[in-house]
Image (tube, grey):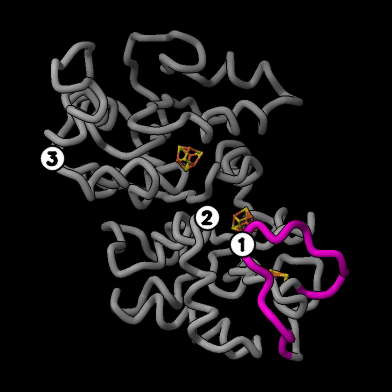
Amino acid sequence: MKTFSLLNLTSCTGCSVNILNAFNDNPEWLGKTLRYSEFLLSIKEKRRTDVLLVEGGVGTDEDFVKLKELAELSDQIVVIGTCASFGFISSFGNYRDIGELMIMRLGREKRGRLPCLIERVRPVGEVVDADMYIPGCPLPGHLIAGFMMDETPKVSKIVCAECPRTLASGKAPNVVPDYGGLAPGPECLLQQGYLCLGLVTQGGCGAPCPSAAAHCIGCRGPAHYLADLPTEQRIEKVIDTLHRRTTADLSLLRKELSAPTSLLFLYPFSPEFSRPPGYERGRVL
Ligand code: SF4
Ligand code: SF4
Ligand code: SF4
């Protein structure tokens, strides 16, 4: 069993909660292996460990210093979740000026206290050399459990390969708008008109969403064949792949992919996303 530190940077802590969920049946495991976690167990003393798990983007001075310190004390750095891997939700403030964000948060009188924000929230791999990435929002519990137990989990190239539904061969007659509810039929969700992103998304999660009749929104990030493309071609490839499986015209498809939840999760597919250093086949679970 590997010993580990868990570091929460700028994040919602959902990935850390999923680590707890993953070890629900084996709670004593945490007591034996966790050496540092301010969030889960209020352990503040930094110690040497086999693995450092890092959640969230690097968004503050404190994030930066703690990450560097703990990286020095760990043999392996594992980036957990889509925020830590790509910036993702933790980096959406990058589109605003820091001064503007402070005023939004504190008011013009600047009452209250905020951490010292750095100019741009950065993915973990831009600050330290990452050995392994486990994206997902939140990261899939069975992947981190397998990794920590030295049982390398199987990861498919795309979500469709893990989905119990059979990929559509025919074209959908329409497109179901975002928030269109759960799919009624047992067929592939694309065939039913839902813009399921299973074809373009990195596998490994076990396809829980399409299994539960909800379309995949791509939280694991782009499949490698897309991540390898030049950034400006990536979103067009997503649109093209979906278009080949629906009868909807391109403008409708683009409109639906611009709906709030689609936009949120399409960020790692967009031209804004650049693959962090070390994010390559063989180093992604
Ligand atoms: S990847 Fe999702 S669950 Fe994990 S920290 Fe980011 S927003 Fe939270
Ligand atoms: S439902 Fe989605 S994930 Fe499943 S086969 Fe169809 S497109 Fe792929
Ligand atoms: S099916 Fe898609 S949205 Fe659901 S967990 Fe897997 S990658 Fe994320």
Helix or strand or loop: what does disc 2 sit on? helix
On screen, 158 above or below 217? Answer: below
In percent of the image, x 40 and y 43: which residue is there? Answer: 79
Q: Any magenta on residue 5?
A: no
Mark 1 vs 2, N-terminal side: 1
Q: Kindly report which numbered mark, 2 or 3, lies closer to the viewer in this rendering.
A: 2
Q: Is residue 64 visible?
A: no
Q: Are marks 2 and 3 in contact (CB under 8 Å)?
A: no
Q: Any magenta on residue 184?
A: yes
Residue 172 falls in image quadrant: bottom right
Residue 214 shown left or right of residue 205 in the figure: right
In percent of the image, x 74 and y 57: which residue is there? Answer: 181
Residue 166: image location, x then y, percent: 80, 77
| Residue lying at the far front of the rendered structure | 108
Mark 2 vs 3, N-terminal side: 3
In percent of the image, x 59 and y 69: which residue is there? Answer: 197
The amino acid type found where label 3 is placed reads Glu
List the residue tagged with mark 1.
Answer: 178
Q: Kindly report which numbered mark, 3 or 1, lies closer to the viewer in this rendering.
A: 1
Q: Are marks 3 and 1 in contact (CB under 8 Å)?
A: no
List the residue tagged with mark 2.
Answer: 261
What numbered label is drawn on residue 119?
Answer: 3
What distance separates the C-alpha of mark 1 from that of mark 2? 7 Å
On screen, 101 above or below 126? Answer: above
Q: Are marks 1 and 2 in contact (CB under 8 Å)?
A: yes
In which of the image's four quarters is ligand 3 placed?
A: bottom right
| Chain part drawn in magenta | 171-188
Q: Is residue 200 visible?
A: yes
